[in-house]
Image (cartoon, helix red, strand yellow):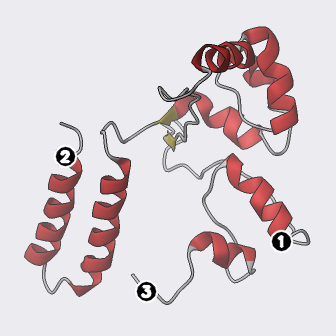
Amino acid sequence: MNTEIPNSFETFLSGKVAFMFGYNYHLPSIRSRAPKLNLGIAPLPQISQDNPSNYANYWIESVSKKSAHQNEAWDFVLFATAKENVASYLNVTKRPTALKELLNTQTDDEDLYSTSVQTLTAKNWYQGKNQAATEEAVKEMIEQLPAAVDDRNFANIIKNAITKINQTTK
């Protein structure tokens, strides 16, 4: 890993790379920060069309226990996620649907097409309790791998990351 190279999002915005793997929520930032960027959106390339694999990114609504207005906040969450209300919310926010019956309504939208066709094959790989610790373990592994001098060292770096990640799932 070269820490002197900007992250993929910044590099894409600056036009130094031709593509990036991202999520639908990146679009507003891309369009506001690089309005002249000639942008196309496509589904994630697949190794096997018969067994596609995609990774989900979930946005979950919640209400803090410390909220002075918990009941009202939950009422709003229930209102906003009700089938009869969610379609108008999705149209305004340009967010992908979580409701299977609304998937067909998003396939004609260029910004949502990729997400809508990949929804049914999307998986969440991480099932643990500490996403930050997991991200740190993966980051450390990526930073250490280029210095691995042999296969054994390489394997130990990966095993160490797996151990750290597994500790967050207990």
Dot 2 and dot 1 residues touching (CB under 8 Å):
no
Q: Residue at x 14, y 62 (%)?
A: 160
For the residues labelled 2 and 1, the Cα–Cα distance comes to 39 Å
Label 1 sits on residue: 34
Position of residue 65 measured from the top left corner of the image (x, y, whole percent): 47, 26
Ranked by sequence position, the earlier of labels 1 and 3 is: 3
Q: Which residue is at a point 55% across and 36% down the rendered structure image?
A: 58
Task: For mark 3, give the secondary structure.
Answer: loop
As drawn, 75 above or below 94: above
Query: In what element is the residue under mark 2?
Result: helix
* Mark 1 residue type: Ala
Secondary structure of the residue carrying numbered label 1: loop
Q: CA distance from mark 1 to mark 3?
A: 24 Å
Q: What numbered label is drawn on residue 16? A: none
Which of the two residues, 122 or 27, is positioned nearer the viewer here? 27
The quarter holding residue 79 reads top right
Tell me which corner region of the image, top left, top right, bottom left or bottom right, holds residue 39. bottom right
Provide the residue designation for mark 2. 166
Say which residue appears at 11% left-offset and 68% top-offset.
Answer: 156
- The alpha-carbon separation of the residues under discs 3 and 2 comes to 27 Å
Q: Amino acid at mark 2?
A: Asn
